[in-house]
Amino acid sequence: MTTSSGVSAGGIERIGPSSTADERRTLREFLDFHRATLALKCDGLTDEQLRRRACPPSTLSLLGLLRHMAEVERTWFRIVFAGESELPLVWSDSMDYQAAYEPGDCTWQEAFAAWQAEVGHARRIEREAASLDVTVHAERWGEDVSLRHILNHLVHEYARHNGHADLLREAVDGTVGV
């Protein structure tokens, strides 16, 4: 069963994962569902609204979450899995992972384009991998990780941050349930 949850956010369609697919397709579809959910949470808001922090002193904002997820995609797929170890982060040359949460004068268009580019790289890298069992050494964590682990981690990371995005969006304009 595949269900559609609508079309929005820069033409991104959120489609529910199949309930009968193999493991790899299931992981891919759950990850794409959560990616689309984050984009939908940001859809239709101004740059100012996307920068709004719902719960001071927290620095979380929808724009910051989108920027953070661009870093997460780049780190796990390009830097860790594909071995592009000299590649800087999207928003920091000094490997400061917290920098993404501070959007500064970054616009929605810039953040969305950077995020979409990293998602495109991630999809290509995942599709080119022979199997979910392929492992690489994650230098930062000092352990080997499989593509299966990375895909599951990304699903977890998006699901967690989409919960934050629910609260942030509701605080901005009252929208719930996207």
Image (cartoon, rainbow, N blue to C red):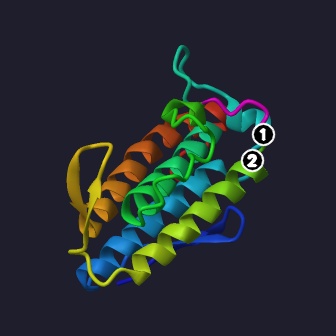
Q: Is 161 placed left or right of 90 in the picture?
A: left
Tell me, yes or no, if residue 32 can be seen here: yes
**Segment colored magenta:** 102-106
Amino acid type indicated by mark 2: Trp
- Residue, disc 2: 108
For the C terminus, the quadrant is bottom right
Among the two numbered marks 2 and 1 on one chain, the one whose residue lies closer to the N terminus: 1
Crowd around label 2: few <14 · some 14–19 · many ≥20 (10 Å): many
Amino acid type, mark 1: Asp
Point 45% across, 74% down: residue: 125
In the rendered image, the quadrant that contains the N terminus is bottom left
Q: Which residue is label 1 attached to?
A: 47
| Residue occupying image coordinates x 51% and y 56% | 74
Q: Which of the two residues, 29 or 78, is positioned nearer the viewer here?
A: 78
User: Residue 31's mark?
Assistant: none
What residue sits 45% from the left and 56% below the top?
79
Res. 61 visible in picture? no
Q: Position of residue 137 (x, y in %)?
A: 26, 57
In this orientation, which residue lies closer to the viewer: 82 or 62?
Answer: 82
Q: Are marks 2 and 1 in contact (CB under 8 Å)?
A: yes
Q: Position of residue 141 (x, y in %)?
A: 27, 43
